[in-house]
Image: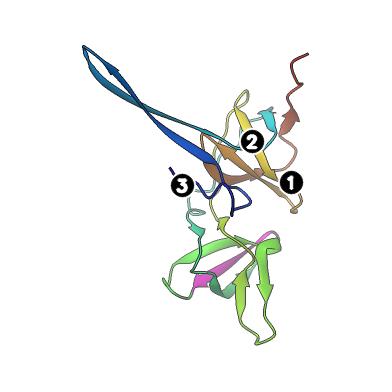
């Protein structure tokens, strides 16, 4: 199942599993990506107004309100209002604005002890993570690296 594994920075390889038995079929799924796993050391409650994301080919945005870490933008093709991380916004020579790549605009609630994959820790204020195959932002400083098995 296509997860953009070869073309997206945060792509993943997905598998849909059909287990056939005499009692009937059961279905499950799994995925794999190359991101390092971390443990969450403090709860983070997401801002529920920060949802959605920008996906190809709908990259054109119109910045509406710039804040410290995010800019509220109108996605030109859909007219949706999204909170785009400032580091993922670029201005073209034409003066138009786009996002740099597919990017989540959602925050994800996490709890102490959760295991997540770190996608991008280079931005101010927040880290981009994946939990259960879903991308989103959490505040910085609440992840610790999981020691590798020896």
Question: Whole-Å distance between the Cαs marked 2 and 1?
Answer: 11 Å
* Residue occupied by mark 1: 121
| Mark 2 and mark 1 residues within 8 Å of each other at the beta carbon | no
- The magenta segment is 69-75
Q: Residue at x 48, y 54 (%)?
A: 49
For residue 18, the mark is none
Badge 2 or badge 3: first in the primary sequence: 3
| Mark 3 and mark 1 residues within 8 Å of each other at the beta carbon | no
Main secondary-structure element of the magenta-colored stretch: strand
* Residue occupied by mark 3: 2
* Residue occupied by mark 2: 117
Kind of element beneath mark 2: strand
Say whether residue 102 is left or right of residue 66: left
Is 72 magenta? The answer is yes
Where residue 95 appears, as percent x and y from the top left, is 65, 85
> How many residues crowd mark 1 within 10 Å: few (<14), some (14–19), many (20+)?
few
| Image quarter (top left, top right, bottom left or bottom right) of the N terminus | top left
Question: Whole-Å distance between the Cαs marked 3 and 1?
Answer: 25 Å
Q: Residue at x 74, y 46 (%)?
A: 121
Pick whichever, 42 or 79, lies toward us.
79
Kind of element beneath mark 1: loop
Pick whichever, 62 or 64, lies toward us.
62
Is 95 magenta? The answer is no
Q: Residue at x 73, y 50 (%)?
A: 125
Q: Is residue 62 above or below residue 150?
A: below
């Amino acid at each position: 199942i296509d997860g953009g594994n070869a073309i997206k920075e945060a792509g993943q390889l997905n598998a849909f599993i059909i287990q056939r038995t005499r009692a009937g079929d059961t279905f499950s799924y799994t995925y794999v990506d190359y991101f390092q796993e971390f443990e969450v050391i403090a709860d983070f409650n997401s801002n529920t107004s920060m949802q959605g994301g920008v996906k190809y080919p709908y990259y054109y945005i119109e910045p509406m309100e710039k804040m410290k870490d995010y800019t509220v933008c109108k996605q030109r093709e859909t007219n949706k209002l999204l909170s785009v991380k400032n580091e993922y916004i670029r201005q073209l020579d034409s003066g138009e604005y786009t996002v740099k790549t597919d990017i989540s605009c959602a925050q994800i609630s996490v709890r102490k002890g959760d295991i997540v994959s770190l996608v991008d820790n280079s931005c101010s204020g927040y880290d981009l993570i994946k939990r259960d195959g879903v991308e989103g932002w959490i505040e910085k400083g609440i992840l610790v690296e999981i020691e590798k098995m020896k």
